[in-house]
Amino acid sequence: MNGTEINTEIRIEPQAEAHRHPPIHEISEEPHSVTITRSGILHQQANQRGKSGLRRVLTYGTFDLLHYGHIRLLQQAAALGDYLVVALSTDEFNALKGKKSFYSYNVRKEMLEAIRYVDLVIPENSWEQKATDVETFQIDTVCMGSDWENDPRFESLRDICQVQYLNRTPGISTSDIKTSLKG
């Protein structure tokens, strides 16, 4: 879902749907490029980390065959801060990793955007983009499932943000679902 680009001060009225974040009612008087997310939270690329007062969390994944383990991971990730960014693997990036998703990137993105814990979904196009994502979205904490612990692609981020690993939900995984559907 694309946001609305504006370059002036705005007021946001509270959304009808319940969300875990209160809306931000005012922004700086300086002109900024602002995207209004479905939750009513502002993403300001011109903003400096911490200026908004929000603790921003980032996680990565494919989120194919969405299941309760994914939901629990997103819930735990959201609990680490105030604003959750999900970097969703694109179909092209999955192909580079030798993976094929059942659902297309756009469908997976739409499903994630419908989850109340998620504030913003961005594309994950490569392994190398992680440090850039942390800087661009002013991330305080990157979190991943515990199966990624000690992976240098995430450990290398410790110089610029916190890195936290969350326990997987026992008894459920996309791989297990795919295996059980085959036979």
Image (cartoon, helix red, strand yellow):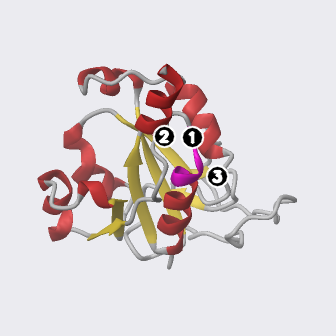
- 155 left or right, relative to 93: left
On the image, the x and y values in percent for residue 170 come to 45, 58
Instruction: Tell which tag, 2 or 3, sits nearer the viewer.
Output: 2
Q: Nearer the viewer, residue 142 or 175?
A: 175
Spot occupied by residue 124 in the image (x, y as percentages of width and height): 36, 38
Tell me the crowding category of disc 3: few under 14, some 14 to 19, or many 20 or more residues within 10 angstroms, Cα based: some
In-front residue for pair 39/148: 148
Dominant SS in magenta: helix
The stretch in magenta equals 66-70
Amino acid residing under circle 2 = Phe
Whole-percent x and y of residue 155?
16, 62
Identity of the residue drawn at 82% across and 64% down: 13
Report the front residue among 145 and 110.
145
Give the Cα distance between marks 3 and 1: 25 Å
Gap between marks 2 and 3, in whole Å? 24 Å
Tell whether 119 sits left or right of 97: right
- Reading the image, the residue beneath label 3 is 36
Q: Is residue 68 magenta?
A: yes
Percent position of residue 159, x then y = 15, 69
Whether pointer 2 and pointer 3 mark residues with C-beta atoms closer than 8 Å, the reply is: no
Q: Nearer the viewer, mark 3 or mark 1?
A: 1
Tell me if I can see residue 135 in this picture: no
- In which quadrant of the rendered image does the N terminus lie? top right
- Labels 2 and 3: the sequence-earlier one: 3
Q: Is residue 110 visible?
A: yes
- Marks 2/1: CA distance? 6 Å
Residue extending farthest right: 16
Q: Dot 2 corresponds to which residue? A: 63
Q: Which residue is mark 1?
A: 66
Q: Are marks 2 and 1 in contact (CB under 8 Å)?
A: yes
Amino acid type at mark 1: Leu
Secondary element at tag 3: strand
